Image (cartoon, rainbow, N blue to C red):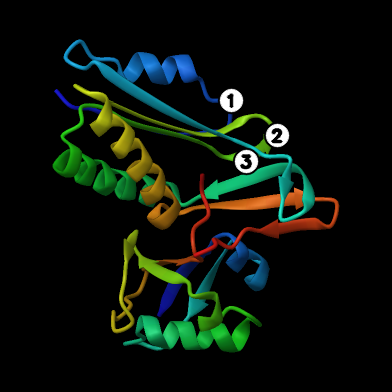
Amino acid sequence: MQSNFFRLKNEPLSESEAMALIQDDTCGANVLFVGTVRNNAKGSVVSHLEFEAYEPMVHRELQVIADELRTEFGVMHVLLFHRLGKVAVGEAAVIAAVSSAHREAAFRATEALMTGLKKSVPIWKKEYTADGAVWVTPTP
Amino acid sequence: MKISILFFGVAQELASARQMVMEMPDDTSVANLRHELAIRFNGLDDTLAYAVAVNEKISQMDRILNEGDVVAILPPVSGG
């Protein structure tokens, strides 16, 4: 039975929890991507980030992406944890994880999950630097 | 008619609000609303390339709004 695990959280994300959720005895490949907050952006020193989301639409968009991953790569479980609110440098802002029978599908699907997240899931990032705070505009 | 508007990301700063209720004429379309927002709020215009969701679904320009609709202003996303 394939499952999706989508969570938006104000508290630190747990890699071990993510791993436990996607692990499946039919799968030999488990890929976890952890995106952490960098201390720099475009030459400025970043102190922290802040995220906000349009939560009902986040779940709907992630469901669409997960369906596409199963069609394209035949993967088992799909997981996306994302932080909301203030996130400090070094902390995980996002965990994307996929399990599948073999590694190629899991790697490719995890990459596609992150690409989909950055393209269509309604979450926004504000960067706090010494120069002030600015909402990030995605680079094409 | 009254419609509720939610502002996200930079749109929140441009509108100086997270949400508001706007009075609009009947048969207002998404395109009409975008035009009105551009007049009211400096920078909240097509240069921002924002999407509009009506009742949590991405909507096209010709979508006609109804009393009580919840309209979300969604700038280009930047999660991850």
The number of callouts visible is 3
Q: Which residue is drawn at 40% across and 80% down?
A: B1
Dot 1: chain letter: A
Q: What residue type is labelled 1?
A: Pro
In front here: B57 or B17?
B57
The verdict on a common chain for dots 2 and 3 is: yes
Q: How far apart are marks 2 and 3 (CA)?
A: 10 Å
- Position of residue A127 relative to residue A30, above or below, is below
How crowded pointer 3 is (Cα within 10 Å; few <14, some 14-19, many 20+) is rated as: some
- Position of residue A106 relative to residue B22, above or below, is above
How crowded pointer 1 is (Cα within 10 Å; few <14, some 14-19, many 20+) is rated as: some
Dot 3: chain letter: A
In front here: B21 or B40?
B40
Would you name the residue on which mark 1 appears? A12
The disc, 3 or 1, on the residue closer to the chain's N-terminal end is 1
Q: What element carries label 3?
A: strand
Q: What residue type is labelled 2?
A: Ala
Would you name the residue on which mark 3 appears? A85
Q: Is mark 2 on a helix, strand or loop?
A: strand
In front here: A135 or B8?
A135
Q: Residue A106's image quarter?
A: top left
Image coordinates of residue B24 in percent, x first then y, are: 44, 84
Would you name the residue on which mark 2 appears? A88
Q: Distance between the residues labelled 1 and 2?
A: 10 Å
- Is label 3 in contact with label 1 (beta carbons under 8 Å)? no
Image coordinates of residue A102 in percent, x first then y, are: 22, 23
Q: What residue type is labelled 3?
A: Gly
Q: Residue at x 79, y 52 (%)?
A: A44
Image coordinates of residue A2 in percent, x first then y, are: 18, 27
Q: How far apart are marks 3 and 1 (CA)?
A: 11 Å
B57 with respect to B7 (left or right): left
